[in-house]
Image (spheres, rainbow, N blue to C red):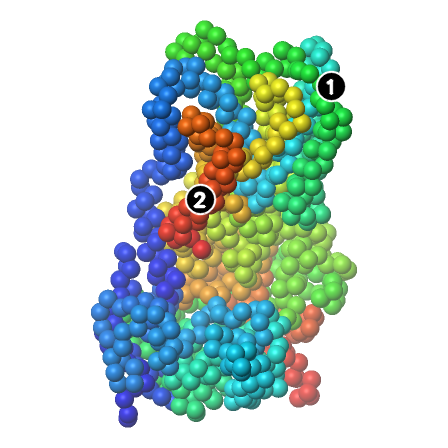
Amino acid sequence: MIRETAGSAKTHAAARAGRLPKINPVFFVLAALLVAITLSNPNFVEPTGYMNFLKRAAPLAILAAGQIYVIVSGGFDLSAGSLITLTVVGSSMLLDNNADATWWVIPVMYAVGLAVGVVNGVVVSFLRVPSLIATLGMMITLNGAAFMWSSGSPRGYLPETFRFFGRVNLQGIPLVQFLPVALLVLMVVGTVLFWLMHRTNLGRMLHALGDNPRAAQMSGVPIEKVRIIAFVISSLSAVTAGILLGGFAGVSTDVGVGYELQAITACVIGGAQLLGGRGSVPASIAGALTLTAIFTLLNFIGLPKPVRDVVQGLILIVAVVLATYRRNRAGGT
Amino acid sequence: MSSPAIEMRGITKSFPGVKALKSVSFSAFSGEVHALAGENGAGKSTLMKILSGLYRPDGGAVIVGGTERHFTHPLAAIRAGIAVIYQEFSLLPERTVAQNIFLGREPTRFGLIDHRAMNDEARRVLALFGSAHRIEPDTVVADLDVASQQLVEIAKAVSLDARVIVMDEPTAALNEAECEVLFGLVDTLRKRGVAIVYITHRMREITRLADRVTVLKDGETAASFDHVPEPDAIVRAMVGRDLGDFYAEPARLEEIGDVVLSVRNAGNDRLKSVSFDLRAGEIVGFAGLQGAGRVALAQAIFGFTPFTEGEVTLAGTPARFTSPREAIRAGVGLLPGDRKAEALVLMQSVSDNGMLTARALSGLSAKADATPFVSAEEMETLLRNVDVRAGSFSQDIKALSGGNQQKAIVARWLALAPRLLIFIEPTRGIDVNAKAGIYHLMRDLARKGAAIMMVSSDLPEVLGASDRILVMRSGELVAAFPRGVSEADIMLAATGEEAVAA
């Protein structure tokens, strides 16, 4: 039968391709963009140039590394951006300009993140609400909560102890002169999330769940548990991103606005399958860096924020189209 | 004899890396059924896709009604009177029967669609098969059963005045009664002078319907008969070897051990007071019509749609499971009947598919390549042992043939060494050699002490592969037969006709 025949032809092609190391195209795109940035601004190759770039990209990269867990499991987490806002606003309210409170405020914010993730996961798993709707509801709720908590006018600033993570550069590091703490956080989070996704059973279960939930269930995958964990990881990464953003952006009720879509865009640029079953943590981080690089480039060119939004929207669509096209050519169904 | 309705001469077609057809010739005359048989991948569908204009041949000629044609588009073939009915229907589920039949060529009146004319014409076409009362033209297609949908598909072909109708494994989704309706339909079409190309690999259908038989193997004509030969001759041509050992040896008496699964008066909303035992070392076939409750029973044992009453024990301990995970933990495995929907994770590798259940039962934070049940290397060995043919086990499983996919799912369960393994339609849609492979794997597993429950709608398979046969009807177990019972006895029990006879 033809499907079989063509299938075996594809098998041969795939086997041939398999012998060459397959590199995700996002890394080439990122490299090309970095070259373009360097050409338009030669200072970029100096540590202050690229380190500040990485520092600025770190919150989005962390958010994308968490979002990819939900995407691979077959869902979306739209509440991530509003959780960033809640983290920043909530921290400033709890800290109340008291630097000594940092040690307990951060765990409290992670507890809030854990709760948000569990609620998202439970609503999607047990109440069967589509994740798009469930997390959209959560997004509106959290934004409202942040607004109510601060009565619409968040208080002043965050103490230095809290801003340490997002703002401080560790000096005197060999080769690179200095290392932003935010980048360090990204490397640690990235490594842990990479390991969880690509080396453990959890990662394989997430892929199976997003690929075919019914087959996963009938194969013994604890689908509810796996799905809840995915949402929790996404929420915890949002809290982490919020702590970094609070460090260098300051306090406002719109600090997290739009971050959830940027994170989803980053994952798609990294080749994630939007309906689940396929995705990679390093490629999502590279996707976040790519998106930040594009914004940086647009900044250099001097384009205003609305143009950036238009570009981001177009990138999202183009990335999905390209991913679909590639998959069809690679012989998927 | 007059010239054939269609003739294909020396057709050659290559795909990258594969020579799909090597100089294949084929013809069909008006008023005959020409069966086209062959294993999956033999080239049957490629040949028909060339006939229907979906593919263009690299060499050879397609002659329709005496003139050579070069179809560049399926529409051209349809206009030339060639209709192909594929396994996957091309009907729009949310439209009515009449709308589907006239899709794209609706009759109009004052520029508006003339619904009355459309419905009348649809009724007339359906009446040709005596189906006018079974199917109303204004029924929405999604509300029809599969057989009726197929009928609509055929009616569409007839209303197009097709002189040649190609049916690609039309019974794949039909039950016994529905098959009979289809066979009657084919007879009607033949009498009306339509040339029918009937693709199948079921011997029963060939014997019942065909006037001539052509067998393809590896893209070549392996045999061509101007009459219907003995089934053995066709199978030999298809497989290229004798099939003396098609089914595995039955269990010897001493191989049958203790009771593994015991079900007593168990039921739920689809099952009524079911009682039976399964013993270690035996393969028990479950026969019955579609909807008789066999799959419901399997899913109840597996905890997917649990029993609500009765007693179930597995190796002596209570075993009324409420989730598949719980059942798997206790040593029950299930190979679903719908591979794509219920068993495979298509975007993942062959190896990941094999490892899935072993990983699911291990700790979530544990390393993925070494579960307590099986390591990644052991899975590779297992996949090789069950003869999964793939370029590499790290390639996506969706590129594999149905038979190889099924064997990978068998490997998934072998890794768990279950006490009870339930196979639902284990060989649906896979080729003859792979079928034999599955039967032998089932037997090996039974020899190692597992109990095997096999739910199958393929009667020869139930008869050939089982040590014992239980028959279900309307959610109840109605008969038990030893090995060697006749197909007729099973059908009588399955349909409940014996009550009438008695």
Measure the C-alpha gap from mark 1 to mark 2: 42 Å
Q: Can residue B464 be seen by looking at this rendering?
A: no
Q: Which residue is mark 2?
A: A318
Position of residue B263 measured from the top left corner of the image (x, y, whole percent): 70, 61
Position of residue A327 measured from the top left corner of the image (x, y, whole percent): 41, 49
Q: Can residue B206 be seen by looking at this rendering?
A: yes
Type of amino acid under label 1:
Leu
Q: Which residue is mark 1?
A: A94
Q: Residue at 30% of width from left, 82% of height from top?
A: B64
The answer to which quarter of the image holds residue A201 is top right
Q: Residue at 37% of width from left, 79% of height from top?
A: B79
- In terms of secondary structure, where does tag 2 sit? helix
Type of amino acid under label 2:
Val
Q: Nearer the viewer, residue A139 or B465?
A: A139
Please state the chain letter of the residue tagged with numbered disc 1 in the rendered image: A
Identify whether B102 is placed above or below B191.
Answer: above
* Left or right for B197, reference B97: left
Q: Residue at 54% of width from left, 61% of height from top?
A: B338
The answer to which quarter of the image holds residue B34 is bottom left
Q: Residue at 65% of width from left, 71% of height from top?
A: B292
* Left or right for A136, reference B122: right
Q: Are marks 1 and 2 in contact (CB under 8 Å)?
A: no
- Local crowd size for mark 2, using a 10 Å CA cut-off: few (<14), some (14–19), many (≥20): some
Please state the chain letter of the residue tagged with numbered disc 2 in the rendered image: A
Position of residue B333 measured from the top left corner of the image (x, y, whole percent): 58, 53
